[in-house]
Image: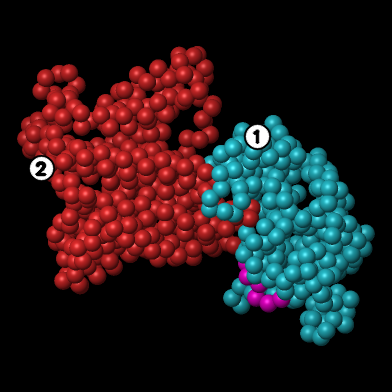
Chain colours: A red, B cyan
Amino acid sequence: MSEDTASGRITEEGGRSLPSVPGRYVVGIVGLLLLALLPLLANMELGLGVPGVFVFVVDDLFLLHLTTALYFGMFAMSWDTVSGYTGQISFGHGLFFAVGAYTSALLNLGYGIDPILSIPAGIVLAAVAGIVIGVPALRLRGPYLSLVTLVAPLILLQLFIFRSDVFGGELGLRNPENFLGFGVNDAAIVYYIALGLFVAIMALLLVVTRSDAGRVFTAIREDEDAVSSVGINPAKFKIFAFVLSAAIGGLAGAMYVHTPVGGPTPTELMSTTVNVEVIIAAVLGGMGTIVGAAIGGIFVGIVPQLLDSSGWIIPGFLPVVGGTPVADIDFLIFAVITLFLLYVLPGGILRAVIRNGRRVRNSRRGDDGVATDGGQSERVFTRVLRGWREKRRGDDDE
Amino acid sequence: MSSERQGSADTGATPQRESYGPDDGILVVDDLRKEFGGLVAVEDFSFAVEEQEILGFIGPNGAGKSTTFNCVTGFYEPTAGTVWYQGEDVTGRPSHEMVNAGLARTFQHFRPLHDRSVVDNVALALVPDKLFSFGGLRGGTRDRAARLCERVGLGDDLHRTPDELPHAGLLRLELARALATDPTLLLVDEPFAGLAGSEVESISNLLRELREEGLTLVVVDHNMRGLLSLIDRAVVINFGSKLAEGTPEEIRNDEEVQRAYLGGDL
């Protein structure tokens, strides 16, 4: 990902000669091109130019890890659609991921249905799960709804454990067939399928959130009564957001289990860690932006893998963790990095990059760019929390 | 009060207790009742709004004005009673349906969307209630929103955020947003609270102009002084039931109204 931001700064300058295309679009397209070209760099050493420092090789394993990260990115985008935009914070989004994945895996393993048909079935069932979770969202607001989303995957997990004969319990199921039969030896193709879907889903969600529906979503996040007071039915849009999000989460989950790396197990699909990671991904990338969630999803998907395979050892002079191989505590390090980034980049990676890009450009032009986005800096997260506080207060006094 | 209670039990012997039919006005409220647990906030309250009038809806704080309002606009479900709008029974309809039927409202505590500019606040009200609509992408919506902002006097504040607006500006924004839904009847909740004298005058003028253009207005306020010069007719509510009804002159001279206001606020 370091290449992404570095090249970002360069194209930021290049974008100035094309005033009709804002710099961030150029950055985005360059980022996607980089992802698209990655398999062509197979077996070349990438690094920072210093021998031995942060060198990694784009091999098949890396591409498969990145495939996982792309599906996680899709999953993060689906979370962002419902939670970042409408403010209905879901603490159990793994439910949709798991429903899509298990449906498709069970149909494939149990009935021999080809993934090309079982995956759509997984999407449909995930969408139904979206309605099941979305309907309480019409009555419950704020923390109360979040509790529903938190409990729902626990119920599903208990069901999976109770009927281990069908669902494989906590160990999960064995791996179903690969999508179109592409296995470990076709890593580049598996990767390109994931990338294609990733781009398609991102385009779809960008269209939805930039259309009128997106305006209504964010207005619901701000004030639901204000939305209905201008003649728009918030319930309809909330259900729509839930169903859309669930269907895409289900698609990501279903595709994931039909890759050679992913399998239908509760740890991978619906554990508390997954539910939390998806929130980290979207918030870290930039909640309420879709693109930010996509970046965050890839980040969360790939960084622990990179740390795991880095082979570094933490310097001995550090207390507690000194002398430990990074691979042993990769998730700990990842969590610390995340916490640090959340602290220094409030509003997420995407907003920070756009803001700095603008500042760089404006300072070159000699403009004072502070006033232009001075009013927009409040974080989505802060808004949602404020909304919760207001709702709790509102329950008492009106 | 005790005589009124008796009056409410029969079929309307006193003139203040007449019952209304669906065609008595553009908006007719008959025997509206709203209870919160054991508390009766609005008690068998009836009134009618005639087309293209400015009706004042007056009452001291806590008299049940906003509750009545919320029942009429679908934010609360009435406990009993009937609401007719343009001859149709609309009791208990959800608020967005009321708005689409042509009955818009503003909020007493302004509820702008803090995350977007003034013009985008108004543009939201122009979005149709459909899941798939892309009018916003063509830019026409924004032009219409900008025209509405200019109409209410926010032409210079299009790209400000609501947090940067003064109190009167927020009121104008509420009005613009309500007007964007293309209403035939507009309920304005406590517009004059917290406004300076000159601002009361300019908002009053705006409301009068809107009436000239064909809008029917119901203006709620507890402050009679600003209101009586604006309205054609007033309904006074106290303790959840009707205290008086009539022209501003009649209201001003009504003893019961004077008593409700402790003789002071007139």
Q: What's the residue type where badge 1 is placed?
A: Leu
Residue B246 can be seen in this image? yes
Secondary element at image label 2: helix
- Which x, y percent locates residue B20? 82, 74
The dominant secondary structure in magenta is: loop
Residue A389 versus residue A188: which sits nearer the camera?
A: A188
Q: CA separation, marks 1 and 2?
A: 56 Å
Residue B70 versus residue A393: which sits nearer the camera?
A: B70
**Mark 2 — on which chain does it sit?**
A
- At 17% from the left edge and 55% from the top edge, which residue is drawn? A177
Marks 1 and 2 belong to one chain: no
Image quadrant occupied by the N terminus of chain A: top left
Q: What's the residue type where badge 2 is placed?
A: Asp
Which residue is disc 1 drawn over?
A: B158
- At 74% from the left edge and 69% from the top edge, which residue is drawn? B88
Residue B59 versus residue A118: which sits nearer the camera?
A: A118
- At 28% from the left edge and 66% from the top edge, which residue is drawn? A156
Above or below, A15 against B239 in this view is above
Residue B18 located within the stretch drawn in magenta: no
Tell whether A322 sits left or right of B133.
left
Q: For the magenta stretch, what is the residue range?
A: B76-81
- What number is the disc on residue A328? 2
Image quadrant occupied by the C terminus of chain A: bottom right
Tell whether B219 sits left or right of B120.
right
Where, by quadrant of the figure, is residue B157 drawn?
top right
Above or below, B47 against A127 in this view is below
Where, by quadrant of the figure, is residue B7 drawn?
bottom right
Residue B79 located within the stretch drawn in magenta: yes
- Which x, y percent locates residue A277? 28, 48
Q: Nearer the viewer, mark 1 or mark 2?
A: 1
Above or below, A81 against B64 in this view is above
